[in-house]
Image: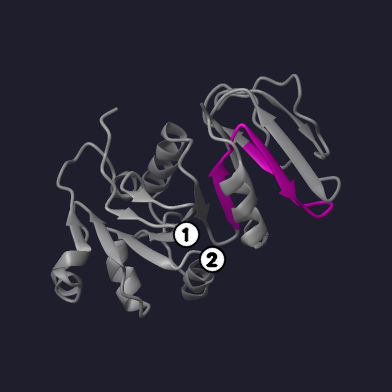
Amino acid sequence: MKSIEPILNTRKNVTLLGGGAVWADRLTEALSFAPKLVAADGGASKALALGHMPDCVIGDFDSLGAESRARIAAERLFHIPEQDSTDFEKALMRVRAPMILGVGFTGARIDHELSVYATLARFPDRRCIILGEDDLCFMAPPALCLATRPGDRVSLFPMGPVSGRSDGLYWPIEGIGFAPDGRVGTSNRADGRQVDLWFDAPGMMVILPRDMLGQELIARLVAAPDWG
C-alpha cells in the first residue's frame, strides 16, 4: 500500500470524532484521556455543537455543512476528495498518535459502523479504541494483558480466521479456530483480576464494557507488541 503522509503527528492521544451517535459526557470522557480532537468530516459539526473546536478536520467534506465549515479556520481543514475510502479511514491513516479513541462511529447507520470495524481489521497495527454507549472495542495485538475484575465480560469476535490462547478467561480459547462465519468468542468473562491473551494472527476484535476504559488499558495497549 502507498505510504500516506500524516496530517497530525503528535505524542498526545487523539480523540477522533465521527458523525454517528455522540453523547456529550462520553466525548468529555474521551478528551480527558485523548486531548487532541480530530473530526472525520461531519464529526466537525458534532464537535461544534458540543462546544469543541477540532484541531483538524479530515474527510471528503460531503457531510460537512457550509455553516460549520465557515466556523473552522482554513488551516484546520484537510479535504481528501478520493472516494475509495471512508472518512474514518481517511482520518485514521493520517493521524500518528500513541492511541486514538474513536467516538461517534456507533449507534447510527449500521453500514457505516460495519465499515469502521472492517477498516480496523485491515489495519490491525493502528492503536484505536472505538467507544460506544455501553461497550468499547479494538483489534487485538499479538499479546495483551488486561486488568479485570472477576466476572468482567471479555468478548472476542474474529474478523478473519484466527486462533490463540488465554489465561484468566472462564472459557479458555486454546485449540479453537475462530472465524466470522464459524466459531466466535462473545460473552466470555474474566475469572480473576487479570486476563492474558495471545493470538497467532491479526483479526481478533476484543469487546469490553465501556467502564473498563482508563489510563491502564490505554497504556497496556500502547505498550503491546505490533504485528510484524
* 69 left or right, relative to 57: left
- Please say if 85 is above or below 71: above
Q: How far across and how far down the image is residue 177, in percent?
A: 66, 19
The residue at 54%/34% (across/down) is: 226
- The magenta-colored residue range is 135-156
The residue at 43%/53% (across/down) is: 97
The three-letter amino acid code for the residue at tag 2 is Phe
Q: How far across and how far down the image is residue 159, in percent?
A: 52, 31
* 74 left or right, relative to 224: left
Q: How far across and how far down the image is residue 180, in percent?
A: 55, 27
- Looking at the rendered structure, which numbered label has been put on residue 187? none
- Magenta segment includes 150: yes
Count of numbered labels shown in the rendering: 2
- Please say if 139 is above or below 41: above
- Give the residue at mark 2: 33
Q: How far across and how far down the image is residue 71, in percent?
A: 19, 76
Badge 2: how crowded within 10 Å, few (<14), some, or many (20+)? some
Q: Nearer the viewer, residue 220 or 208?
A: 220
Q: Nearer the viewer, residue 155 or 102?
A: 102
Q: Nearer the viewer, residue 109 or 116?
A: 116
Q: Are marks 1 and 2 in contact (CB under 8 Å)?
A: yes
**The N terminus lies in which quarter of the figure?**
top left
The residue at 26%/39% (across/down) is: 4
As drawn, which residue projects farthest toward the bottom?
51
- Magenta segment includes 115: no
- Scheme by which the image is coloured: one colour
- Give the residue at mark 1: 13
Q: Residue 75: in sight, yes or no?
A: yes
Q: Residue 62: in sight, yes or no?
A: no
Name which of mark 1 and mark 2 comes first in the sequence.
1
The three-letter amino acid code for the residue at tag 1 is Asn
* 206 left or right, relative to 9: right
